[in-house]
Image (cartoon, grey):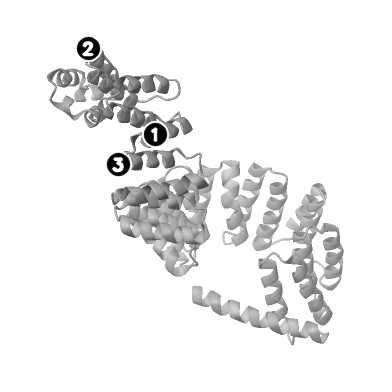
């Protein structure tokens, strides 16, 4: 894929050089139409529309007997927000090719750009009466663009659905409908539509991709992964299918499969910071800190302001117990983004292991203040204070946390604080509240105070409040 792209770039650059030489000599003249199309495509792709319009005017001078370049000129003018000029150009095109569907579609687009949507719809409705299924599908796609402009996304969805029912292979309709589904929230209908298309065309990569996207939004993760896989198996150059499949795999913690998808992207396409970042995350979750670190470093080379990559490097150093390096990496993440609680929590952990306890407390506190609704940061701060023989302060932190967050971990942490303060009766009552809230989380108490695992009173309370397995079936 990359080799083909490099070869294509070289051909285009040679063509540009030849064109520039012709301009300097005062006459642009290619022996056939294709070089003009290639140059227009290039400048259009680079969003240099004025330059593309210059090329198309030269093409019209040489091949003005045909409607082709007038149509291309109108397309460029519409992209360049020159709707009135585009309509005039379409008049010239129609004189050379009366009754052309493409001209009617562009004219409707021009009307819509001038807020003449009723005229645009009327024109399209008139063309529907004479159209075959493939042409009808094209007309519906144009109509859908008008509804998109009016932000009528539900209407847009049904028009695109009609386009695909008329022609399931219409790539423009398949490309447009995937984001329309999200705006119109038509996920279930999208699943049914694309399953029907796939029944008729099992090698339709875009249909598989759209099916995967709909399943993804519906949280049908396994179905989404399967659909995305079929998309890139059907079309090996479908970059988005690889990336989106990997994203779902990351979400369901299938890091090995996610890594395989990202490696395919790295081999087939141009890498970027986001790709290296996510490969690093895969290796980090798989416990390979050294390799993960190299990919996070590559991400920062592509994007020096990638805070997630610096945080990932901090996590790698933490995993390797290189706490000073971890501090440096976490600090760089915070300098780029100072509203992420995990970055402060990482700094707190690193300073804790370096015995910089004042700094550790500051950053644990910052993490809790940045995301007060997250119980885990309050719990970590309280645990730190208990570890520093300050259970009274820890209890105050837990009292404060109740104003913002809720969770069984806060209740178990409160029980541990009370045990440390030798308020056993209150501690056992707090333990009862925690067990009622979430019995399965009671190991968190022993993580805070391992000695309690041998306490008979604690074990008695746990045994007494253990849920009856059989009662859940009654």
Picture layout, residue 348 above or below residue 17: above
**Mark 1 and mark 2 residues within 8 Å of each other at the beta carbon:** no
Residue drawn at x 56%, y 41% as measured from the top left: 185
Residue drawn at x 30%, y 49% as measured from the top left: 319
Marks 3 and 2, how far apart in space? 34 Å
* Residue 162 as seen in the image, left or right of residue 209: right
Residue nearest the viewer, comparing 230 with 310: 310
The x and y percentages for residue 324 are: 35, 49
**Mark 1 vs mark 2: in front:** 1
Residue drawn at x 50%, y 41% as measured from the top left: 338
**Figure disc tally:** 3
The x and y percentages for residue 257 are: 35, 56
The x and y percentages for residue 393 are: 34, 21
**Mark 3 and mark 1 residues within 8 Å of each other at the beta carbon:** no
How many residues crowd mark 2 within 10 Å: few (<14), some (14–19), many (20+)?
Answer: few
Q: Kindly identify which residue carries mark 3.
A: 353
Can you say which quadrant of the picture contains the C terminus? Answer: top left
Marks 1 and 2, how far apart in space? 29 Å
SS for callout 2: helix
Question: Visible in this render: residue 321?
Answer: yes
Mark seen at residue 364: 1
Q: Kindly identify which residue carries mark 2.
A: 425
**Mark 3 vs mark 1: in front:** 3
Residue nearest the viewer, comparing 22 with 371: 371
């Amino acid at each position: 894929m990359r080799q083909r792209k490099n070869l294509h770039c070289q051909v285009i650059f040679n063509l540009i050089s030849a064109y520039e030489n012709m301009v300097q000599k005062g006459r642009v003249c290619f022996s056939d139409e294709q070089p003009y199309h290639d140059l227009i495509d290039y400048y259009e792709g680079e969003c240099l529309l004025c330059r593309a319009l210059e090329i198309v005017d030269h093409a019209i001078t040489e091949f003005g007997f045909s409607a082709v370049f007038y149509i291309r000129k109108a397309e460029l003018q519409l992209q360049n927000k020159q709707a009135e000029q585009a309509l005039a150009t379409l008049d010239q095109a129609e004189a050379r090719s009366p009754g052309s569907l493409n001209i009617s579609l562009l004219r409707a687009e021009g009307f819509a750009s001038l807020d003449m949507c009723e005229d645009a719809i009327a024109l399209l409705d008139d063309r529907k009466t004479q159209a075959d299924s493939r042409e009808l599908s094209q007309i519906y796609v144009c109509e859908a663009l008008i509804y998109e402009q009016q932000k009528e996304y539900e209407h847009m969805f049904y028009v695109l659905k009609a386009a695909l029912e008329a022609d399931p292979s219409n790539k423009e309709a398949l490309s447009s409908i995937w984001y329309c589904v999200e705006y119109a929230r038509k996920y279930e209908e999208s699943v049914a539509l694309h399953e029907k298309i796939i029944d008729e065309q099992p090698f339709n990569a875009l249909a598989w991709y759209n099916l995967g996207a709909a399943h993804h939004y519906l949280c049908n993760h396994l179905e989404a992964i399967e659909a995305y896989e079929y998309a890139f198996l059907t079309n090996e150059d479908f970059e988005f299918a690889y990336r989106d499949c990997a994203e779902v795999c990351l979400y369901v913690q299938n890091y090995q499969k996610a890594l395989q998808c990202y490696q395919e992207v790295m081999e087939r396409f141009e890498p970027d910071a986001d790709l290296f970042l996510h490969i690093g995350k895969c290796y980090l979750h798989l416990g390979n800190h050294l390799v993960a670190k190299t990919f996070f470093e590559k991400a920062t080379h592509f994007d020096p302001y990638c805070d997630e990559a610096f945080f990932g490097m901090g996590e790698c150093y933490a995993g390797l117990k290189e706490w000073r390096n971890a501090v440096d990496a976490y600090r760089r993440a915070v300098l780029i983004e100072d509203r992420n609680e995990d970055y402060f929590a990482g700094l707190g952990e690193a300073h804790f292991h370096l015995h910089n306890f004042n700094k550790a407390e500051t950053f644990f506190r910052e993490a809790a203040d940045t995301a007060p609704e997250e119980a885990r940061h309050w719990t970590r701060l309280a645990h730190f204070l208990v570890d520093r023989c300050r259970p009274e302060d820890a209890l105050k932190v837990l009292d404060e946390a109740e104003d913002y967050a809720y969770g069984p971990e806060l209740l178990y942490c409160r029980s541990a604080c009370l045990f440390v303060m030798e308020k056993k009766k209150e501690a056992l009552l707090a333990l009862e509240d925690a067990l009622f809230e979430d019995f399965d989380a009671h190991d968190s108490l022993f993580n805070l105070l391992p000695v309690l695992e041998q306490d008979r009173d604690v074990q008695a309370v746990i045994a007494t409040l253990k849920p009856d397995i059989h009662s859940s079936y009654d």
